[in-house]
Image: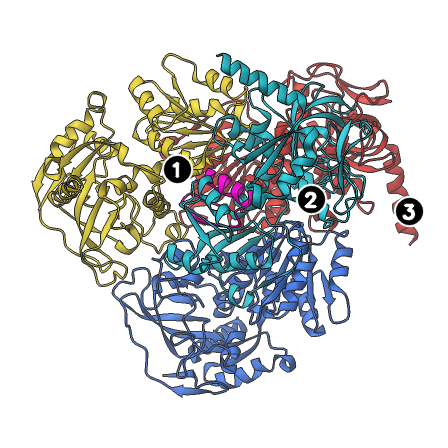
Chain colours: A yellow, B cyan, C blue, D red
Amino acid sequence: MNALVYHGPGERSWDEVPRPTIQQPTDAIVRIGSSTICGTDLHILKGDVPEVHPGTILGHEAVGTVAEVGDAVTTLEPGDRVLVSCISSCGRCRSCKESRYGLCRGGGGWILGHLIDGLQAELARIPFADTSVYRVPAELSDQQVLFLADILPTSFEVGVLNGGVQPGDTVAIVGAGPIGLAAIMTAKLYTPGRIVAIDRAAARLEKALEFGADVAIDNGSEDAVERVMHLTGGLGADVAIEAVGAPETFELCADLVRPGGRVANVGVHGRPATLHLEKLWIRDVTIMTGLVDTFSTPRLLELIANGRLDATTFATHRFPLGETMAAYDTFAAAAETNALKVVLEAESTRQDLLEHEGAAIGA
Amino acid sequence: MNALVYHGPGERSWDEVPRPTIQQPTDAIVRIGSSTICGTDLHILKGDVPEVHPGTILGHEAVGTVAEVGDAVTTLEPGDRVLVSCISSCGRCRSCKESRYGLCRGGGGWILGHLIDGLQAELARIPFADTSVYRVPAELSDQQVLFLADILPTSFEVGVLNGGVQPGDTVAIVGAGPIGLAAIMTAKLYTPGRIVAIDRAAARLEKALEFGADVAIDNGSEDAVERVMHLTGGLGADVAIEAVGAPETFELCADLVRPGGRVANVGVHGRPATLHLEKLWIRDVTIMTGLVDTFSTPRLLELIANGRLDATTFATHRFPLGETMAAYDTFAAAAETNALKVVLEAESTRQDLLEHEGAAIGA
Amino acid sequence: MNALVYHGPGERSWDEVPRPTIQQPTDAIVRIGSSTICGTDLHILKGDVPEVHPGTILGHEAVGTVAEVGDAVTTLEPGDRVLVSCISSCGRCRSCKESRYGLCRGGGGWILGHLIDGLQAELARIPFADTSVYRVPAELSDQQVLFLADILPTSFEVGVLNGGVQPGDTVAIVGAGPIGLAAIMTAKLYTPGRIVAIDRAAARLEKALEFGADVAIDNGSEDAVERVMHLTGGLGADVAIEAVGAPETFELCADLVRPGGRVANVGVHGRPATLHLEKLWIRDVTIMTGLVDTFSTPRLLELIANGRLDATTFATHRFPLGETMAAYDTFAAAAETNALKVVLEAESTRQDLLEHEGAAIGA
Amino acid sequence: MNALVYHGPGERSWDEVPRPTIQQPTDAIVRIGSSTICGTDLHILKGDVPEVHPGTILGHEAVGTVAEVGDAVTTLEPGDRVLVSCISSCGRCRSCKESRYGLCRGGGGWILGHLIDGLQAELARIPFADTSVYRVPAELSDQQVLFLADILPTSFEVGVLNGGVQPGDTVAIVGAGPIGLAAIMTAKLYTPGRIVAIDRAAARLEKALEFGADVAIDNGSEDAVERVMHLTGGLGADVAIEAVGAPETFELCADLVRPGGRVANVGVHGRPATLHLEKLWIRDVTIMTGLVDTFSTPRLLELIANGRLDATTFATHRFPLGETMAAYDTFAAAAETNALKVVLEAESTRQDLLEHEGAAIGA
């Protein structure tokens, strides 16, 4: 079979590789129907994630069909269509028992396309299959659920739930890339009074408004703290969500949150930030960090199935799985291509779509 | 001044009564701009609420303008436009300090139009004014906020918040009268996956669908439990909200809630229900009762101000305040008039509206 | 091997039975070191639990040593000393993922000594071993942890945690049998202000005071509601825990809880109760039911290991495992024998104890 | 009357000053029975709190007797014995309605001995008396409740409750001064598995063990992170409480907390700290700051009344109120005097004590 293989910093190729096999009785083999590329994959390619060894197949987001299951797999069988999540859960350790699958101490957590081969491939081995994949209702397309593999639960759990967004709240979201947009989309599930998107790129702020932000602040040209204070009668935002991963944007969040408010950090950071305890100690502020656990995936799936959430708007570009190399080029040049998420589709998935479109045309 | 006075079971009239005066330094006198009638007022007239003495002015919902304040009132001044809530809070007792104003032990709770004169009047004395009224932003009309005086916080706090409605949940609401409709409207703030309205009257079920229910079940002709089980894969509703006040509807809620689910009782009950502990003991069910506290009023006000919530749809009929007697007739005959809420408007309020409409026409 | 076998209502015997074998890759075989008898076992013997088929080995509480594991078991190996809990968890279903193992929909829940062979035996097959047993630290004796198999997590989770006991609270516990005593013991973890035990048997009330109750009320001779009101300045108990399983005691709990308080039902009920909604609707009361999930077992184990909790006081009688028939007689006659829990010990466990005592004597 | 007056950095004296009078209808005048000195008073004397104007009477902790009340005070009358808390609450603003009295926006918060005259005086004016003082049961002595005025609710709310201490937890408390000791004392209300005290002074660590810490770590001579990791099987503390107010100790808390754990900052900070987001972003850590609100005072009072909490151990030295100057000297030299808290007693209080002791001797 073929897959996108990492060959060290800056090096990737679409290679013929051996077909994966069941290694543990809890494994499943999944035939990938649709996959996608994450900003983290670009970080890996820059060499920022040294624990990824050359030779690893990348990718941690996919929808596919179970091809084979190990002896201990009880909830899946060949033919089942499943969402494969960025987080694997052993289901047995203390972290997993507390629904913190991202902190799994039993061999799970973020392993796919990181510590073991990933999902930008024709087939993939999925450890702990019973506790790490989610059955997809037949009436939902791959594209409707694909972004549940990472970006939606990430923004929902680490941003919106950690932020404790409540109806009527003013929610400031710093960073309007895909993660920030997913935070806007999922914050709306709690009907905040006002969503304020903050970014320095006009194109991204425009997208933020399209996704449902009420106010867009260009903090390259405007003082975001002042504006938020003005909007909130001098109080500050109830919730601030960091969706960039830089010290400055984190500090901005701490500056614009109200006394008694919450800062939820979603961004991946490489450097420390300054925490102004000399101001914050008296302000009753809660700051939360976290990696996605994907415990909310069934709930988000229910919302999509009921038409309450439509994540297909993230899919700006589509490629056949065999053209994953080109898809990377498009995704990496997001500033020019305006790519949010690129969808990689196996031949069979494309065939289904064509038939479906044909049917639709025929109807 | 004039007011609607209760004269014993079945007896009410629009009487000339003495103008209210400040009695405690924490009192305010409010000139009523808009008021409305509650189902509870009809109960009082039937003689069901014996602690209401003949001679009492009825009404516990209004928007008005502060006319006078006592010496200890610090947050209000004459001319302020305010929402007067069905619940008064002394702000000093244990219950008030825990935001359970409905259980106030310092002289508040539900007193207006119950233990003291109420709000279907030209003027009213409002005890504990600092902690019992809410300033209304100038840009909001009386009608936009009037139903925050009772029905919206009641359904939101006692139904939706006690029910713990979460995104994606199946919420069953038994009873589609005004309280049930307000539960539908405020449940939507949390984006449930599916709202199921259950009632025996086709007209009310139709209203429920208009207000946002996804499924309407006529439990006169259909087995509601069976239908809810079918909708939820045999599991049951995540949340069941009782909005009638009868043993049968409460028991229905307990029957259709899933293991691990929650029953929130909003209805006012006159008789005991049977609790099937022989089935429920093992099902991890939470049952909550409660009177509204109105702690959520500022949050709901914020949602209205931000255009997230529109309660004006409850106002099916409008009357001048002087025609309150006729308004009662219309409201009491809801089965024929299809009245949800009738709005009583002082002359000045009507004048404002006319000018506003004139301005709109002129524009 | 030998085991205690149920042969239909009123019939039990200590029989030679086939040695259990691994049936699923997730099974383990455990050699029982210590076991005990539950009130539920007596119910089974009375024929009250018809889903227990004649021929079933009884018992759902034990400490033992892993003898053999299936291919998919990853966290255990032969020789590990483990607590086997009354609740098995598949670890894969929605209920298990939400830590509601008692409601497991994947084949777990209460199955041992109920739907499959149990733990009053020399050896037992334990399904879902990775997610259903707990390793016991070497420094803890069987007797220190044995009651974590059922009674302690039951009273803690369903009584104390569902009751939301907080420091300073007045906690009324109705029923002072083993479950009520375990509720007293685990309520003390949250330092309530006052624990009130209510029962009709003087001997049980005496035990309640020994276990840490502050007040004992004999509700055969005294009005318990009046006394609790007197103790709490007319307010009522913050938390009421039902530990009997009768309509009257449940209704007593609802009568003596304060407005805004919580009723936690631990008792197993066979008949419905009357819920006085005509009084309760306005009182902001929360009522919770539930089966134990055992999610708190690691926490309770930690407390025992740190000397914060001593459950050995429940062990009033000890028997060799081979004398389980006599142990049943003693336990069933608790009114005369004052038995709380009887400990059944395998020969090896007794040998260990003797050696330990010998060592202690020799020291 | 006499009082301790601040006259600018380094300057204080026991002066004759005018007797305070009612200024607002919500005021009360309280005759001080017992008062004490806070570390914050020493900061004021150093000039660290510039908003304190010369001429201000210091002190924000007292027990006394109501001498006079304003017209709007409804819950108190002359002769009532009350605890006067460091935090005043207007009871009317959004913050007060959410029980965040420390953030009161209506004129309360920390004002006594800060923005207005304080409590190291014979008499004091207490604004918002109804919502800012607590009646003391007759059976409790001044000394039993005096430390509820600040130190106990501070450590309980900002340390223990913000830290979410649960039974069985490992709680690391950095700093074993009075605030750290109060955190140890109140953490024990939740029966943690292990309390680890960390400090650089041997005398303070000894006190920590006396107050109930299980482990004392001198982080001058030992690597505290390593030791905590060793104690917790490499995981880290469930809760870390900062009770110093320095960047280093805050950073230590962030280093020794487990993934998924909580850092509660109680210390008052003058400088920013470094937040190692490059390590923390993935660790699911919650960090909380806060000023005391004193919402927990009634609960703590209940615990003292029930003998569950004994705060008298903080009182290391006693002085007549007239010798407040000497008391300051003793408290400021805590390193030599080992003072934790010094009690200032009015003549009447001392008389009561003597009579009580006499009675005890006579008995």
Q: Which residues are magenta?
A: B165-189
Q: Position of residue D200 (x, y in %)?
A: 54, 35
Q: Of the numbered discs in the image, which one, if any, rests on residue D358?
A: 3
Give me the C-alpha separation between circle 2 and circle 3.
45 Å
Same chain for labels 3 and 1? Say yes or no. no
Task: Give left or right: position of A151 versus C187.
Answer: left
Q: Which residue is mark 1?
A: A158
> On the rendered structure, is C26 left or right of B155?
left
State the SS at label 3: helix
| Chain holding disc 1 | A
Q: Nearer the viewer, mark 2 or mark 3?
A: 2
In the rendered structure, the answer to whether residue C61 lies left or right of residue A331 reads right
Cα–Cα gap, marks 2 and 1? 37 Å
Q: Nearer the viewer, residue A252 or B147?
A: B147
Within 10 angstroms of label 3, few (less than 14), some, or many (20 or more) residues? few
Horizontal placement of B258 versus A64: left or right?
right
Q: Chain of mark 3?
A: D
Q: Nearer the viewer, mark 3 or mark 1?
A: 1
- Front residue of B206/D282: it is B206
Amino acid residing under circle 3: Gly
Disc 3 to disc 1: CB gap under 8 Å = no
Mark 1 falls on what kind of element? helix
Rendered position, C255 above or below B267: below
Q: Residue A311 in the image: state x and y as whole percent.
A: 30, 36
Q: Which residue lies at the image location 65% right of the left edge and 63% below the top edge? A: C251
Label 1 crowd (10 A; few <14 / some 14-19 / many >=20)? many
Residue C273, image x, y percentages: 61, 66
**Chain of the residue on which disc 2 is drawn:** B
Label 2 SS: helix
> On the image, which quarter does residue B157 sit in?
top right
The dot on residue B103 is: 2
